[in-house]
Amino acid sequence: MHEPDIEVHDDAARIATAVAGELLRRLEAAQARGEVPQVGLTGGSIAVKIHEELGRRGADSDVDWSRVVFWWGDERYVAADSDDRNARSARAAFLDRVGVDPAHVHEAPATDSGQSLEEAASAYGRELREHGAGAFEVLMLGIGPDGHVASLFPGHAALAAGDAVAVAVPDSPKPPPERVSLTFGALNRTHALWFVASGDEKAEAVARALAAEGSVEETPARGVVGLPDGGTAVTWFLDHAAASRL
């Protein structure tokens, strides 16, 4: 595995600018090669800023948005129109603004589907198996102050999900408590892995995730390292506060 690249920016706005610009460049390059790139999005406050930047710049780029496929690393199991849905925020700020084909936006089921949480996780996993490309072109992930990634939390059973693609998380310590999350096995299948973090409340978790030693059980972000053959380029986009303990 290659050492991760660490980019330190002034603040969250500068992170958003850097990530948006790099994503546009990467998507343009993939499409120039004749590919239909697949992207894994994340939620959280820094993701909102990134999506807003993509919404502003995306329509004027050379990306053919009808030929990009989107997924999420995790989703809150709430109603489809809930403001807690990661997908709802991304659609409003970015996806709907640039004209992404709705058929290429893959969300985990919401409570409106009538499925149980476990059924929703199974359905999302099947969808990724059937319609995924085998690996994301880019996967974006945040990291929580406790070191969680997607909705894989320290000490939780979901950390040992085995061969599952997606897992039900019924007891998230962060509300809302019910989530659907991709597993480590699915999250690691990406050509480019981008962690994004802003704020001094993330500094300790970032330092634990990047330390030479430590456990995945304590800091789940350590479990997302990319493809086993070392073919994943890993980048951490941080501001000075989040990087302050490195």
Image (spheres, rainbow, N blue to C red):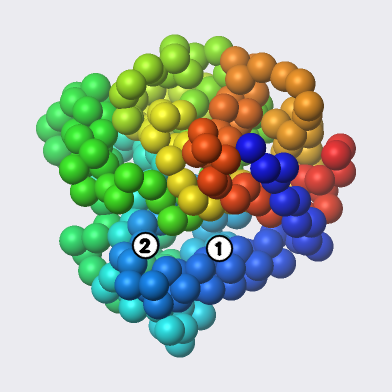
Which residue is tagged 2? 37
Residue at horizontal 70%, vertical 31%?
A: 209
Quadrant of res 2? top right
Q: Secondary structure at mark 2?
A: loop
Q: Considering depth in this image, is 176 or 14 the residue closer to the camera?
A: 14
Q: Considering depth in this image, is 238 or 139 the residue closer to the camera?
A: 139
Visible in this render: residue 203? yes
Q: Secondary structure at mark 1?
A: helix
On-image quarter of the N terminus: top right
Q: Is residue 214 above or below residue 130?
A: above
In the image, residue 174 lies at what x, y percent?
Answer: 52, 28
Question: For this view, does 132 lie left or right of residue 236?
Answer: left
Residue at horizontal 15%, vertical 29%?
A: 115
Residue at horizontal 55%, vertical 46%?
A: 232
Q: Which mark is residue 50?
A: 1
Q: Is residue 78 above or below residue 9?
A: above
The kind of residue on which mark 2 rests is: Pro
Q: Is residue 198 above or below residue 11?
A: above
Residue at horizontal 19%, vertical 26%?
A: 119
Counting every numbered tag in the picture gives: 2
Q: Which mark is residue 138?
A: none
Q: Is residue 103 above or below residue 238?
A: below
Which residue lies most toward the bottom here? 60
- Crowd tier of the residue under label 2, counting other residues whose Cα lies within 10 Å: few below 14, some 14–19, many 20 or above: many
